[in-house]
Amino acid sequence: MISGYGLENEILVYANLNKFFPILTGYDHGWAMREFNAISSTKRNSSKFHLVWNKRMQDGIKKNITTKIPIISSCPYKLYKERKNIKSLKNKSSIFFFSHSTQKISLEQSTEEIINSFKNLPNELIPKDICLHWHDYSNKKLVNFLENENFKVFCAGNIYKKNFIKNFYQILINYNNCISNQLGTYTLLSIDLGIPFTLINPEPIYNNFGGDRNVPLKYKISDFTFGKKARELFLNKYSIDNNQLDLVKNELGYFDKENSEQIKKILTLELKSSLKNLQFNKTTKYYFKKIFELYNLTK
């Protein structure tokens, strides 16, 4: 099934369901720095179930949306890693992950400023390889600038490609160190592979020019209680410690995860409920979403 970052594919594989089975529940799309993921979108989703990565997200939804039933299904990237038995190769030095923009959110930070911050790293950790999100990789001006600065630019590809997670891991496993100016899902996944993650300053400021209802108009990750705590764990750290490992295990959903049969039961129950109550708008909206994602594959 086409979905952002290939997440639905992994959920369906874990639940032992057909790849065309419609997921009508809400589900987490990434690592959240706030009380729970995509606050506005989660509230507006019509399903009473929401699949979350971890207990922190579960507790956040229980506290703030009493009509929702949050179910821990764990991080789909982790499910893929376990299913494919992925191990790190560590045959290259460092890769830098840019804090990415979106169609509605930009960064108030110049590329030159980010590159200049590399000078504060130990010489052996200064990255020559950079990984961009698809939205930024589509910015040919940015890619050309980085290549002219002698960086090798990577991208896991269009986020609606079904092999996105595979592509991402094929990039990440090659490195001894992962570096970024921002926390992201790659933070968790690198530590999970035994690859140290280093966060560097300056911290990006985000400008929500497009009115994304899930975030403030202008913000930094450190504005959020959890975000501030997480930044302190990784800022200017060059090796993995137990506090980082504990956080990563919890955030990826290693604990309290529901088994595959329970996830299958919930997804099936939601579909049956939609059909029984003649809520065809749910399934119609779902397939319109798939058409939109299919269209974006051609861009």
Image (tube, rainbow, N blue to C red):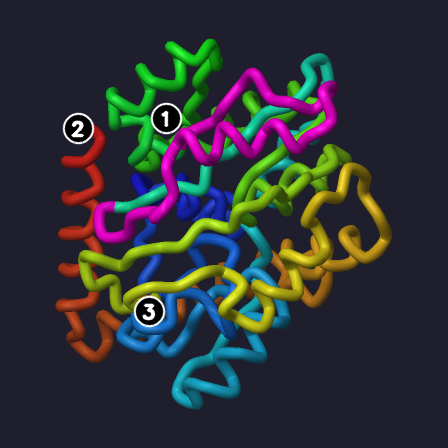
Distance from the alpha carbon under mark 1 to that under mark 3: 28 Å
192 vs 292, nearest the viewer: 192
Q: Is residue 111 magenta?
A: yes
* Picture coordinates of residue 74, whole percent (x, y): 59, 57
* Residue at the spot of label 2: 299
Secondary structure, mark 2, is loop
Tag 3 residue: 216
The disc, 2 or 3, on the residue closer to the chain's N-terminal end is 3
- Measured in 3D between alpha carbons, the distance from the residue under mark 1 to the one under mark 2, in whole angstroms, is 11 Å
Q: CA distance from mark 2 to mark 3?
A: 28 Å
Q: Which residues are magenta?
A: 103-132
Label 1: which secondary element: loop
Q: Earlier in the sequence, mark 1 or mark 2?
A: 1
User: Which residue corresponds to the image point at 21% horizontal and 41% vertical from the top-left?
Assistant: 293
Quadrant (top left/top right/bottom left/bottom right) for the C terminus: top left
Mark closer to the chain start, 1 or 3: 1
Q: Residue furthest right?
A: 242
Q: Nearer the viewer, residue 130 or 289?
A: 130
